[in-house]
């Protein structure tokens, strides 16, 4: 299984809008973190996680790509070593 690139070591808070489509980067190569910019096409088997939220709210998107809850920060970045 391919390993995603660690794009950051802290979540990015985003105020998401109800009904809007969001594509979370799973490969770590996007220059538009935490969102997909199509870089996965060169990174191999990755594809973005697409979500449409039912309500406006703040989401903390993962950038370390180690989360067990794809898209959302679960604190996994705290275990990363510099």
Image: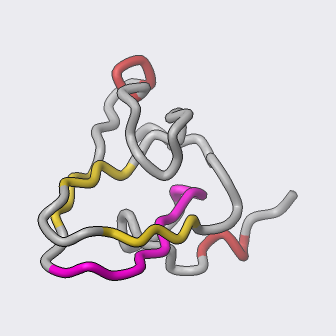
Q: Residue at x 19, y 54 (%)?
A: 21
* Residue ranking furthest to the right: 82
Q: Is residue 50 left or right of residue 24?
A: left
Q: How is the image coloured?
A: secondary structure
Q: Is residue 38 above or below residue 1?
A: above
- The residue lying at 60 percent from left, 58 percent from top is 64
Quadrant for the C terminus, please. bottom right
Q: Is residue 12 above or below residue 35?
A: below
- Dividing the picture into quadrants, the one containing residue 9 is bottom right
Image position, residue 57 (x, y; %) = 33, 82
Q: Please give the name of the residue rendered at 82% of the width and 62% of the height, measured from the top-left corner.
A: 81
Q: Nearer the viewer, residue 32 or 75?
A: 32
Q: Residue at x 36, y 65 (%)?
A: 70
Indicate whether residue 57 is drawn in magenta: yes
Residue 45, x across and y down, in percent: 32, 31
Estimate the x, y position of residue 32 in percent, counting from the top left: 51, 39
Count the labels in the image: 0
Q: From the top left corner, tell me how far across and down residue 77 is, in percent.
A: 66, 69
Q: Examine the structure image and report whether residue 25 is included in the region drawn in magenta.
A: no
**Quadrant in the rendering for residue 54:** bottom left
Q: Dividing the image into 4 quarters, which one contains the N terminus?
A: top left
Q: Which residues are magenta?
A: 55-65
Front one among 10 and 70: 10
Query: Considering only vertical position in the picture, is 52 above or below 25?
Result: below
Q: Is residue 13 left or right of residue 44?
A: right
């Amino acid at each position: 299984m391919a390993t995603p690139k660690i794009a950051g070591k802290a979540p990015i808070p985003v105020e998401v809008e109800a009904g809007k489509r969001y594509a979370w980067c799973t490969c770590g190569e996007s220059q538009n973190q935490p969102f997909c910019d199509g870089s996965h096409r060169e990174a191999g088997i990755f594809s973005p996680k697409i979500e449409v939220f039912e309500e406006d709210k703040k989401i903390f998107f993962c950038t370390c790509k180690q989360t067990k809850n794809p898209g959302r920060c679960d604190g996994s970045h705290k275990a990363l070593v510099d």
